[in-house]
Image (tube, rainbow, N blue to C red):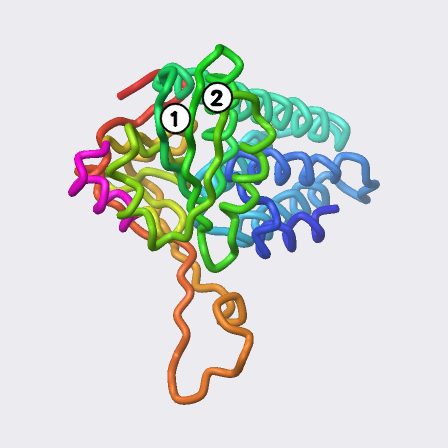
Amino acid sequence: MIDETVEEIREMQTHSSSVVAVKAARALESLTEREFRSLDDYLRDVERNSTALRQANPSHASLQNTQREIVAALDEEFPTIEAAKARTRETIRGVVERVEMAKRRAAEYGAMALDDGMTVLTHDYSSTVLEAIELAGREGAELTVYVTEARPRYLGRKSARTLAAIDRVETHLIVDSACGHFLPECDRVLMGMDCIVGETLYNRIGSLPIAATAAETDTPVTVVGSGAKIIDDGFVFENEFRSSSEVMREPAEGFWIENPTYDATPLSLVDSVITDEGMR
C-alpha cells in the first residue's frame, strides 16, 4: 500500500494537499498490521517509509508536517512492538481527524465569503474551495463560477465537472490565458493553497498571473485552506519540474520544454486568507 501511495503522490493522481496528507498517514498505518522481528525493525521501517512518502512531494507542507509528527511520536521508549504500534495508530488517528476538521472548517468559513449572486473565478483543483462553493450553494446562494483549465494537466476540468453537479452553481470552463478577459466580470478570485511560507503563497502554476491580473482589474483575491499550511519558518519550499510530455508529446527539437508545478505569489497580491480559524 505504501509503494502505491508514494507513486500516486509522485504522479499527482491525488490533487488536494489535505487529501494527500490523509492518504499518506493511512498508508503509514498499514505498517502496524505487519509482523516485525524486533521493536527496532519496526521503528526503522516507519521512519524509512515516512521518508519515502515525504520525498514523493517535498512541496506539500501538510504532508511534510503530518509525517514528521507521526515519526516524532515514536521518539520514546516502548516496552513492546505492540505498544509502539498502538502509539502509531493513536497519532495517525489524531492527525487525520485534525486535517479533515481543519479542511471542513476552512470550507465553512470560505462559504461565508460567497454571497448570493456572486461571480467567482477559481484555478486548478482545490477540494476545500469546491466544498466552500458547495456549502454556499446548499445555503441558497446562486453562484457563477469560472474555472481555469489549469494546464498542462487540465485539473480545472475535474473542478468544472464537480461544480457542474452542484445545484445553483453555473459553471464555465475557460483556458488559463482567458482570465484577464473574464476577471472584470468577477466579484472575487477564490483559490486554494499548497502552502504559505512567510510572505509568499505557493500554489499550482498559473496562480501568480491570475493574482497579478486581478490586481489590475480590482478583483479581490481570497485564498482558502487549512491553517497548518501557513508556515513562519523551518520549511523550505521545493518546486517540482514535471515531464515535458505533459506539455507536448512530440519530441522537442532545438528547444527546451519547461514545466514547473508551482509558482510563488507575493501575499501583497492576496486580499484575504481564510483558514479553519477564520479570515485573516
Secondary structure at numbered mark 1: helix
The answer to whether 51 appears left or right of 219 in the picture is right
10 Å crowding of disc 2: few (<14), some (14-19), many (20+): many
Do residues under tags 2 and 1 come within 8 Å of each other at their CB atoms? yes
Total residue callouts: 2
Which residue is at a point 46% across and 23% down the rendered structure image? 132
* Residue wearing tag 1: 227
Which residue is at a point 66% across and 25% down the rendered structure image? 87
Report if residue 215 lies within the magenta region. yes
Secondary structure at numbered mark 2: helix
Q: Which mark is residue 82?
A: none
The answer to which quarter of the image holds residue 280 is: top left
Question: Which region is colored magenta?
Answer: 208-219
Q: Give the residue type at disc 1.
A: Gly
The picture places residue 191, in percent across and down from the top left corner, at 38, 36
Which residue is at a point 56% across and 49% down the rendered structure image? 51
The answer to whether 59 appears left or right of 263 in the picture is right
Q: Decide if residue 209 is in sight here.
A: yes
Main structural element of the magenta stretch: helix, strand or loop? Answer: helix
The picture places residue 258, in percent across and down from the top left corner, at 39, 70
The answer to which quarter of the image holds residue 11 is: bottom right
Q: Give the residue type at disc 2.
A: Ala
Q: CA distance from mark 2 to mark 1?
A: 7 Å
* Residue wearing tag 2: 102
Which residue is at a point 65% across and 43% down the rendered structure image? 46
Upstream in sequence: badge 2 or badge 1 = 2
The picture places residue 105, in percent across and down from the top left corner, at 46, 17
